[in-house]
C-alpha cells in the first residue's frame, strides 16, 4: 500500500511514494533495500522524517521506512558503557533511557526528533554536544559492496564527521542520490556511568544552557536537570516536535550556520556573532556566523510570511510557471525562531521552499553570505 510522505514527516508535506515498505526488522529492511537496488528502482530510506522535504509530486520509487527498534548494553568496562541502539529507535526515547540508567553522554541532545540511525547522517548536535562525541562505530548496509551489498562496520574516524556532516550525508549530496551509500542499521555509543553512589552528572558546554541551569559553563550538572532544562529551552523555541504547535511543523533549523573566511566578518555589522571555526585546507582562518542573526537582521523576523496570491493558471505544485510561487499564509518562519520554516496547516513543499528561498536570497542580497539548507530535499530544489 502506498503512503504520502506528508503523513510521515515533521513538516507534514510531501507527496505519495510509488511503493512503500515499513521495515519492522533489520532483515525486512535489508530485503527491501536489496530488492529495490537489484531492480534499479530509486530508493529513499526514511527514519522519523524530521530532516526530509519531499517534493509535492512524491517519490517515483520505493520508500523504506526503518521501524525496528531496541537498545542493548554491549559492554561495561569501569565507567565506560557501550550501548547499541537500533536505527529505527526514536532518538529521544533512547536519550531518555540513558538518563534513566544514569549514563552520561547524550543528555544535551534531548528533544531532537527522528531516529537513532539518522543521527550520524548529519552528526546531529545541540547545546555544545554532537553525536560524534560519543559514537564509536556503526553497523551499516553498504549498497556499493561487491556482490550487491554487505553489512559493514564503520568506525567514527571513517565517518569523517563535520559540522552537520558525515560521509553518509556526502554520499547523497555529492552523488545527487536520494539515498546514501550506507544504510545505518545500528549505532554504538560510548557512555559514562558515575561511580557507585555518586549522582550522575555531565559537563555543561553551552553558555545559554549553563545560565538556565544557574551554573558556570564547563561545570557539572545532573543528567536529569540537563535533560529537563534542554527540553524546556528547546520547547520555548519550538524545537521539540508537537502536533499541537505549528511552530514545530518544520525540519528544525532550516539553514546551517555559515562557515566563512574570517575576512568576511569585517564586512558585517559590529553586532554580528562570529565564532572561531578552525582553518581551511589552504590555511585560511574560518569563522562560524549565526544564521538566525543574519536572517533576523536581513529583515526576516519571527513569523515572516509572504502575501497570499490568487492561484494562477499553469501553476505547478503551488508555484507559478514563472517560478515565483507565493506561500500565502500557509508557510512562514516559526513565530518562536527565525531558523525554522514551518507549515501553518495546509502548506505544500513548494510553499515551504518559497519562504526558504526568500530568506536565502534576502540574506545574500543584504550581507553577501550564502545560506545552506540543512534538511535533505528530495525531488525538488531550494
Ligand atoms: C523540531 C525539530 C528540531 C530539530 N532539532 C535539531 C537539532 O537540535 N539538531 C540537529 O542536528 N537536528 C535537529 N533537527 C533535525 C532532525 O531531527 C535530525 O536531523 C534527525 O537526526 C533526523 O532524523 P530522522 O530519522 O527524522 O531523519 P529523516 O528525515 O527520516 O532522514 C533524514 C536523512 O537521513 C537519511 N536517513 C535516515 N535514516 C537513515 C539510516 N538509518 N541510514 C542512512 N540514512 C538514513 C534519509 O534518507 C534522509 O536523507 C530537528 C528537527 C525538528 C523537526
Image (cartoon, grey):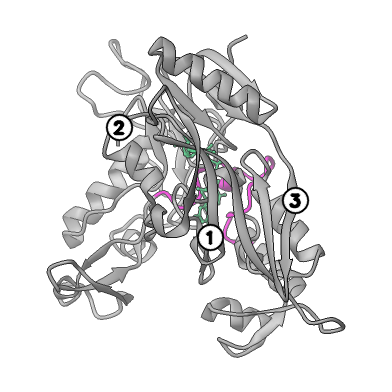
Residue furthest out toward the right: 197
> Is 204 placed left or right of 298 in the picture?
right
> Is 339 placed left or right of 276 in the picture?
right
Labels 1 & 2 near each other (Cβ < 8 A): no
Q: Mark 2: few, some, or many residues within 10 Å (few <14, many ≥20)?
A: few
From the top left corner, tell me how far across and down residue 146 is, in percent. 38, 27
Q: Nearer the viewer, residue 191 or 277?
A: 191
Local secondary structure at mark 2: loop
Identity of the residue drawn at 46% across and 26% down: 44
From the top left corner, tell me how far across and down residue 79 is, in percent. 72, 75
> Nearer the viewer's eye, disc 2 or disc 3?
3
Residue 347 falls inside the magenta stretch: no
Local secondary structure at mark 1: helix
Local secondary structure at mark 3: strand
> Is 285 placed left or right of 191 in the picture?
left
Q: Which residue is mark 1?
A: 131
Identity of the residue drawn at 31% across and 68% down: 289
Up the image or down, 245 lies above or below 39; here it is below
Task: Tell me where residue 259 sits by quadrant.
Answer: bottom left
Residue 250 falls inside the magenta stretch: yes
Q: Mark 1: few, some, or many residues within 10 Å (few <14, many ≥20)?
A: many
Up the image or down, 221 lies above or below 54; here it is below
**Image quarter of the N terminus:** top right
Spatial CA span between label 2 and label 3: 39 Å
Can residue 169 be seen by looking at this rendering? yes
Q: Which residue is mark 3?
A: 72
Which mark, residue 381? 2
Spatial CA span between label 1 and label 2: 28 Å
Residue furthest out toward the front: 147
Range covered by the magenta-colored residues? 236-254
Identity of the residue drawn at 64% across and 22% down: 28
From the top left corner, tell me how far across and down residue 349 is, in percent. 43, 29
Amino acid at each position: 500500500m502506498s503512503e504520502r510522505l506528508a503523513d510521515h514527516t515533521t513538516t507534514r508535506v510531501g507527496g505519495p511514494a510509488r511503493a512503500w515498505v515499513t521495515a519492522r526488522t533489520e532483515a525486512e529492511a535489508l530485503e527491501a533495500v536489496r530488492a529495490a537496488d537489484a531492480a534499479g528502482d530509486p530508493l529513499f530510506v526514511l527514519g522519523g522524517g524530521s530532516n526530509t522535504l519531499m517534493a509535492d509530486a512524491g517519490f517515483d520509487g520505493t520508500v523504506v521506512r526503518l521501524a525496528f527498534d531496541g537498545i542493548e548494553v554491549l559492554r561495561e568496562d569501569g565507567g565506560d558503557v557501550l550501548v547499541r541502539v537500533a536505527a529505527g529507535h526514536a532518538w529521544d526515547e533512547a536519550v531518555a533511557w540513558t538518563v534513566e540508567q544514569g549514563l552520561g553522554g547524550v543528555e544535551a541532545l534531548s528533544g531532537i526528533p527522528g531516529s537513532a540511525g539518522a543521527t550520524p547522517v548529519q552528526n546531529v548536535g545541540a547545546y555544545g554536544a554532537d553525536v560524534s562525541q560519543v559514537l564509536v562505530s556503526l553497523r551499516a548496509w553498504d549498497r556499493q559492496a561487491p556482490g550487491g551489498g554487505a553489512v559493514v562496520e564503520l568506525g567514527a574516524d571513517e565517518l569523517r564527521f563535520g559540522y552537520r556532516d558525515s560521509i553518509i550525508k556526502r554520499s547523497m549530496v555529492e552523488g545527487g542520490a536520494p539515498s546514501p551509500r550506507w544504510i545505518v542499521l545500528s549505532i554504538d555509543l560510548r557512555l559514562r556511568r558515575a561511580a557507585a553512589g555518586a549522582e550522575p552528572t555531565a559537563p555543561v558546554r553551552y553558555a545559554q544552557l549553563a545560565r538556565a541551569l544557574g551554573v558556570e559553563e564547563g561545570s557539572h550538572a545532573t543528567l536529569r536537570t540537563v535533560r529537563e532544562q534542554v527540553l524546556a529551552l528547546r520547547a520555548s523555541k519550538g524545537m521539540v516536535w508537537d502536533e499541537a504547535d505549528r511552530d514545530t511543523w518544520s525540519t528544525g533549523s532550516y539553514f546551517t550556520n555559515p562557515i566563512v573566511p574570517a575576512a568576511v566578518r569585517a564586512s558585517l555589522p559590529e553586532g554580528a556573532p562570529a565564532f572561531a571555526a578552525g582553518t581551511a585546507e589552504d590555511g585560511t582562518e574560518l569563522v562560524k556566523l549565526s544564521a538566525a542573526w543574519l536572517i533576523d537582521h536581513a529583515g526576516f523576523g519571527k513569523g515572516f510570511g509572504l502575501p497570499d496570491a490568487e492561484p494562477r493558471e499553469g501553476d505547478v505544485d503551488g508555484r507559478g510557471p514563472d517560478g515565483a510561487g507565493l506561500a500565502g499564509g500557509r508557510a512562514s518562519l516559526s513565530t518562536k525562531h527565525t531558523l525554522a520554516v514551518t507549515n501553518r496547516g495546509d502548506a505544500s513543499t513548494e510553499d515551504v521552499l518559497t519562504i526558504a528561498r526568500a530568506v536565502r536570497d534576502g540574506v545574500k542580497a543584504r550581507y553577501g553570505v550564502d545560506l545552506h539548507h540543512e534538511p535533505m530535499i528530495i525531488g525538488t530544489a531550494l
